[in-house]
Structure formats: structure tokens, C-alpha cells
Amino acid sequence: MTVAVPSELVTLADIEAAKELLVGVIRRTPVEPCRPLTAKLGGHTWLKCENLQRAGSFKVRGAYVRIARLSEEERRRGVVAASAGNHAQGVALAAGLLGITTTVFMPVGAPLPKIAATKNYGARVEFVGATVDEALVAAHEFADRTGAVLIHPFDHPDIIAGQGTLGLELIEQVPEVRTIVTGIGGGGLISGLAVAVKAKRPDVRIIGVQAEGAAAFPVSLREGRPVRLKAFGTIADGIAVGRPGDLTFAHVGKFVDEVVTVTDEDISRALLMLLERGKTVVEPAGSVGVAALLAGVVEVETPAVAVLSGGNIDPMLMLRVIEHGLAAAGRYLAFTVRCGDRPGHLAKLLAYIAEQGANVVDVAHRRQDPRLRLGEVEIGLSVETRGAEHSDRLVNALRSAGYTVTFDV
């Protein structure tokens, strides 16, 4: 990757200074082994559990460093930020610890738990636009109008230095690491992490992961400059950023070895695995590193570490993601069966499904479709299975028994 590099990039000394500033403020989050990924990759794989950080994500690291370095006059003017949730909480927590008033602009569709947590940390919340980019415009305007100091979510040296302290921890916790995989939104975390890790261990591969529906970095790196996406959307709201920062883009171009993308289906599978096998609650944006490893979109050398960057997930989204993840893993199957509309046929169908070891979750009768023949009924079924192979066996068994099985496209 060859990009234009600003003269002043963050250094290891900057990150070590940030580490000293954060003593007693942040938690040294644990690194846990991940057996499913270890088995898949054929070597030790670990999870850096930043979802257990204060305020539920890595964001407090950079936010505190940035705000703690404000002058007394700047502190009196207060701070303003824009965020879908995690940066908002990090800024609100950090400013609260330092006794500084905070205003946060959030997209209208920001998750309710993140909104509530931001308010509970003492911030005043304003809702603007549908994306973080739109909220950031409003935050800039507020800063110009009131004199409040804008705490950018990623594109500032202090933010990058603060996030880089995660890299220092990780190298100490897993000194033998060969590959680190983490998500990218605006690029603050991977920029700081990469500077820290490459300074200590230049042989370690740093891989960034974006959601396919909000992947501004791959196109920007190809163009050699930050490029704004015309539209974007993903369940990983925490990394849904339409344009890389100028500073973070320079760091990623210089220090990051590869940037890959994952689909929302990949993210759903990762969240399900982390919940089921890892007993770990992670938000979609926090799981994209795991998603990339599970999906096999990147080759890694073990020992490897995937960063779980945040755990602030809306319970309602979690319900939808679990269902989506089950479907993506072949464990939740929705299909339609056509059969005769006669007494006992439904009971016979359900009994046959039970014989195949599947659990019926939902049943819906449809008799009014004009495509149905006289005396025929369409039955919509949702069933739980033991996986993709079991789902295939169930469908084949139903078809062999004479049922017409179709799937909604």
C-alpha cells in the first residue's frame, strides 16, 4: 500500500506517554483462548476482550487521553462529540471523570442502550441525521458556534495514541503473537495498535476488517486517498463510517498489512459462536475480526489474536442477530410445504418433522394464494435443526415423502 503520509504520525513514545496517562483510568482487559478458532486455524488463537473495558469498548482510551490534555480554558468551554454510541460513551465517561461538560450528537437510529448509557455518564445528547458522518457535521457546527472542543472519534493524534495502548497490552499478554486481526471504522484503533505493535514486533501481521456494506478503506487504499462512500449500511453500526480520516488513512497505509471485508452474515455467525461457545457478549462491530477468521477471508499465521473491540449491543438487535446467525449457520430453517387440505395432514406433517429430529418453532396456514390448486394448502414452517447437514437431510426427507418444499427468495 502506497499513500501520501503526513509528516507527523503517532510514535511509540506518544503511545507510551498515553499509557502513563491512563494508569488507574482504564482496565487491562483480559486475553482469552478461543478453542473454535484454534481448531479452525490449526494454532493458538486468542481474543483480546476489550468488550470488558470501562464503558464497554476501547473508545475510553483515546477519549480520556484527548480530553485530559486540554488546557484549563478549553475545559471550561466543554467538549462535543459525534458517535453512534461507543465513542459517545467513552467521551462522556472521560469528561465526567475530569469534571467537563459534554454534548454528544448521535444518529437518529442510534441503539437505545448506548443512548441511555451516554446520558447516564452525564452527557447531553442531541439527535441528528441517519449516520455518524451527518452527526459529525452537526458536532463541528456546534463547536464553531459555542467554542466547545470537538473530540473527534478517530482522526486526532491523541485519540490514536490512546487507542494504541491496547497494542502495548496485547504484545505483553501474548508476546509470541504472529497475527492480529481487528475491525476498522474510522481507523483510530488499528492505527494506534499498528504503530505500537510494529514498533515492538515489526514481523507481526496486522489485518484490518471492515463490514462489506461500509467498506471505505479498501477503495480508499486503491485510490491512494480517503474516498467517501456514496451510501453504506451494515448491522455493525460501530464501524459504519463513510470516509477514512486523513490521519488514520496515513497510518493504515503505512503500518497495516491487509484490509479485508466480511458480510453481515459472517458477522452474525461470529456473534453466535462467541455467545454459544465463548459465553461472550460482543456487538457486531466488535466481532468482525472473529468473523474474518471464521469466514476464511484472510490467511493468518498463528498464534493469532482477534480484538473484540466492544460489547455494547442492543438486546433487540441481539435477538435478530441470533436468529439471523442461526439461519446462516443452517440451524434455523424457514420453508413452505404444500399438501392436501384434509383433516390430519398437518398433524402428520409435524409428526414427520419431529421424527427427523427437528423442532418446529412456528406454523402458518395459507389457503388464499391463487397459485394453490383446489383442496391444497400452503404451510409456512420455521424449525430448529442441528446444523446445515441436518437441514439438508430434513428437506430431502420431506421431498422423498412426497411433500413440495420451497423457500422464499
Image (cartoon, rainbow, N blue to C red):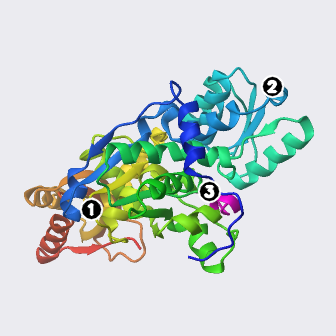
Q: How many marks?
A: 3
In the image, which residues are magenta?
Answer: 240-248
Q: Residue at x 20, y 66 (%)?
A: 391
**C-alpha gap between disc 1 and disc 3:** 27 Å
225 vs 285, left or right, is right
Question: Which residue is labeled 3 in the image?
Answer: 186
Q: Residues within 10 Å of mark 1 (few under 14, many from 20)?
A: some
Question: Looking at the image, do the residues carrying marks 3 and 2 touch, with CB atoms under 8 Å apart?
Answer: no
Residue 33 percent location from the top left of the image: 25, 46
Q: Amino acid at mark 1?
A: Thr
Quarter of the image for the C terminus: give it.
bottom left
- Residue drawn at x 26%, y 63% is 330
Q: Check disc 2 and give the amino acid type.
A: Glu
Query: Earlier along the polypeptide chain: callout 1 or callout 3?
Result: 3
The amino acid at mark 3 is Gly
Q: Which x, y percent locates residue 145?
A: 92, 40
Task: Please report the residue visible at 83 percent of the width from the left and 24 percent of the height from the top.
Answer: 76
Q: Nearer the viewer, mark 1 or mark 3?
A: 1
In this view of the protein, can residue 328 be seen by the observer?
yes
The Cα atoms of the two marked residues, 1 and 2, are separated by 47 Å
Q: Position of residue 331 (x, y in %)?
A: 24, 58
Label 1 residue SS: loop
Front residue (pair 224, 284): 224
**Side (left or right) of 167 relative to 356:** right
Q: Which residue is mark 1?
A: 302
The residue labelled by disc 2 is 72
At 70% across and 57% down in the image, what residue appears?
8
Majority secondary structure in the magenta region: loop
Residue 111 visible? The answer is: no
Sequence-wise, the earlier of marks 3 and 2 is: 2
Q: Residue 162 location in percent, x, y? A: 58, 42
Work out whether 340 lies above or below 116.
Answer: below
